């Protein structure tokens, strides 16, 4: 089941997300680089006074003051965890300045589109310290904030403008710690946290064999928050599961096809598609040929039929057509349709009528008398 349900994404609709959304972690050259697919990794040479890179058409420069240099390290125990669910490989390493000559660090960003932008920066220390310095953040000379985790808003006049963000430590050890930053993402108070199943958990056990409940912690910014829930195998191919939720949980149903019979009894394909309701994934514990006695039509939303889960040579449908009517956000994958002549009727193979945002992926249709497939909708 991990390959089907391995990614559940939830967004809180309290905020408007900008288009850039670039996430960067700072990795010192003295630390063994471990994969962090959610962030771009910027490698910084230890004991250098400045470092530059280009990420997604943005020119980035990190620099220390003239009498100091950039140095980095990590908190190995957390940084090297086998599976990093909560950003451990971002906040447990980073860049600071020389302990002998501590001082400010300047981040320069050039290439942003004209308009308003935001910058979220992580300031977590990796050493055991009695106390850490307070960090003040200036954007182009204007004092913006003073916090352990900073979030600032600024305006860019043109793509040629180089925006300078200066992080200045005061008191304590006099060091400023930078783990990474996010451009044009929501403030922490507007983000959900602690999802369950955890981020990147790809092996899920269904307690009752039928469903799994995804939960998350609400943003701290307010009570009037609604959530959109998406599911898929990759961040760029997510499908909507539910929209406008006010609760911090959603139950995702998994329905198993355990019989090749055609009836409305649980365990059959007709039950999974025409009787069951709500968002669901249909998987197969059996492989072979299902002979249906009448047209089998899906008229629901958020349904995924995972034919690739059928054992052996997969699953095939014969006798009558299989299709969609008035459906939305439905995916059929790896299904073979072979109506043939057993019905003594003139039939087509697979199709969509009045259906929107639906996908027939790696499906085949032959032995049809009117057309293999017909699509009407978006």
Image (spheres, rainbow, N blue to C red):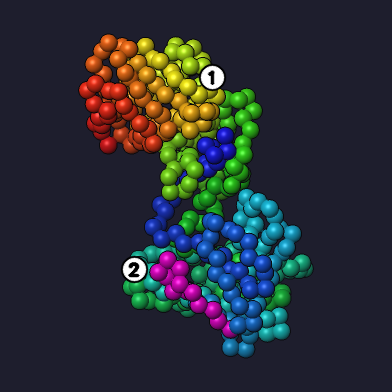
Residue at 41% from the left image edge and 74% from the top image edge = 110
Front residue of 240 and 324: 324
State the residue lying farthest toward the bottom. 67
Quadrant containing the C terminus is top left
* Region of the chain picked out in magenta, as a range: 49-60
Would you say the magenta stretch is mainly helix, strand or loop?
strand
Q: Please give left or right for residue 106 compared with residue 318 in the image.
A: right
* Mark 1 crowdedness (10 Å alpha carbons): few <14, some 14-19, many ≥20: some
* Residue linked to disc 2: 114
* Residue linked to disc 1: 258
Secondary structure at badge 2 equals loop
Q: Quarter-wise, where is residue 109 in the image?
A: bottom left
Q: Does the rendering let one see residue 305?
A: yes
* Residue 51 in magenta stretch: yes
Q: Find residue 366 and report its horizontal and vertical position in percent.
A: 31, 26
Q: Find residue 75 and report its horizontal and vertical position in percent.
A: 72, 64
Q: Find residue 254 and report its horizontal and vertical position in percent.
A: 53, 27
């Amino acid at each position: 089941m991990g390959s089907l349900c391995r990614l559940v994404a939830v967004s809180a609709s309290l905020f408007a997300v900008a288009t850039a959304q670039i996430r960067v972690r700072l990795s010192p050259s003295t630390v063994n680089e471990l994969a962090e697919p959610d962030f771009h990794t910027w490698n910084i040479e230890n004991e250098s006074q400045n470092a530059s890179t280009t990420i997604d058409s943005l020119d980035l420069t990190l620099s220390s003051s003239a009498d100091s240099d950039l140095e980095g390290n990590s908190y190995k125990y957390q940084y090297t965890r086998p599976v990093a669910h909560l950003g451990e490989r971002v906040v447990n390493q980073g860049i600071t300045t020389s302990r002998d000559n501590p001082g400010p660090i300047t981040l320069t960003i050039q290439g942003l589109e004209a308009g308003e932008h935001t910058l979220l920066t992580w300031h977590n220390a990796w050493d055991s310290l009695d106390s850490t310095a307070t960090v003040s953040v200036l954007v182009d000379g204007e004092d913006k904030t003073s916090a352990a985790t900073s979030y600032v808003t600024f305006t860019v006049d043109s793509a040629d403008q180089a925006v300078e963000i200066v992080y200045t430590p005061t008191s304590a050890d006099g060091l400023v710690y930078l783990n990474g930053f996010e451009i044009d993402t929501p403030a922490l108070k507007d983000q959900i946290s602690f999802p369950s199943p955890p981020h990147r958990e790809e092996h899920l056990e269904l307690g009752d064999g039928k469903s799994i409940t995804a939960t998350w912690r609400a943003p701290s910014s307010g009570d009037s928050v609604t959530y959109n829930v998406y599911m898929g195998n990759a961040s760029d191919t997510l499908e909507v599961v539910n929209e406008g939720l006010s609760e911090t949980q959603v139950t995702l149903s998994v329905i198993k096809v355990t019989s090749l019979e055609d009836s409305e009894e649980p365990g059959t394909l007709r039950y999974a598609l025409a009787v069951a309701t709500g968002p669901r994934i249909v998987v197969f514990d059996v492989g072979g040929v299902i002979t249906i006695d009448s047209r089998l039509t899906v008229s629901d939303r958020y349904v995924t039929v995972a034919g690739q889960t059928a054992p052996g040579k997969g699953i095939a449908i014969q006798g009558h057509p299989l299709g969609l009517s008035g459906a939305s956000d439905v995916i059929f994958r790896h299904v073979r349709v072979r109506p043939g002549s057993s019905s003594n009727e003139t039939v087509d193979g697979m199709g969509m009528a009045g259906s929107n945002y639906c996908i027939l992926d790696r499906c085949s249709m032959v032995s049809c008398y009117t057309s293999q497939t017909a699509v009407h909708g978006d």
